Image (cartoon, rainbow, N blue to C red):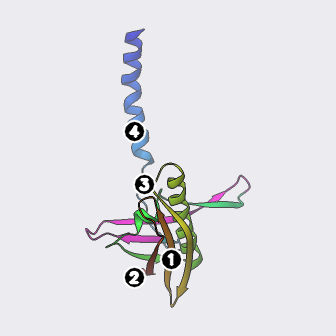
Amino acid sequence: MFKTMIIFSLLSAPVWADEYDQQFEPTVCNEGESCVVTTTVANNQSIYKLIQIEDETGQIVGAKLSAASSITDIFYEGVSACYKGLISDICDIGELMTGNTNVDYSQGGHTSIKSFHCYSIDNVISFEYEVQSDYADELEIQKTKLSKCE
């Protein structure tokens, strides 16, 4: 029995690794898609896309982000951001990021978002939100501006 388990584990390990490697695809924002692109001070770039969720009949029943992301973990001092696509989709991306922050909080995180507002003036999108932290007594108002990517 022990030899059988060893042989099985040796045979299944490479198959699992190959399947895992094939599932990874870097996020790319293609023409016509909506996404937020962030760049850190160290020039590391991340792309967050809006992915529509369809039911079996093809009806859109919701949306999700291309990567798990909390708005407070994405937009911090020194991060620049731009967007591609529709303004309404970018606002949806911001709302989903806010929701992820609140889900994190419900599972033991230390920050939640009390309100989120998204608006656009001259193709510059602004996210404004109130952050409540377990480590502060007062709400902190955060503002992030996203210009159109060049």
Q: Residue placed at 74% from the left, 55% from the top?
A: 57
Q: Residue placed at 41% from the left, 33% from the top?
A: 15
Q: Mark 4 or mark 2: which comes first in sequence? A: 4
Q: Mark 3 or mark 2: which comes first in sequence? A: 3
Give the farthest residue toward the left.
42
Q: How far, Cα to Cα, is label 1 from label 2?
A: 23 Å
Residue 42 part of the magenta segment: yes
Q: Mark 3 or mark 1: which comes first in sequence? A: 3
**Placement of 71 over or under 12, stated as above or below:** below
Q: Position of residue 39 (x, y in %)?
A: 34, 71
Q: How far, Cα to Cα, is label 3 from label 2?
A: 24 Å
- Which quadrant of the structure image shows residue 38? bottom left
Q: Residues within 10 Å of mark 4 (few under 14, many from 20)?
A: few
Q: Closest to the observer: 23 or 61?
A: 61
- Which quadrant of the structure image shows residue 115? bottom right
Q: Mark 1 or mark 4: which comes first in sequence? A: 4
Q: Which amino acid does label 4 sit on?
A: Asp
Dots 4 and 2: beta carbons under 8 Å? no
Secondary structure of the residue carrying numbered label 3: loop
Give the magenta-colored segment's residue range.
36-57
The residue wearing badge 2 is: 150
Q: Give the label on residue 18, or none.
A: 4
Q: What residue type is labelled 3?
A: Glu
Q: Residues within 10 Å of mark 1 (few under 14, many from 20)?
A: some
Q: Mark 4 or mark 3: which comes first in sequence? A: 4
Dots 3 and 2: beta carbons under 8 Å? no
Q: Give the label on residue 25, or none.
A: 3
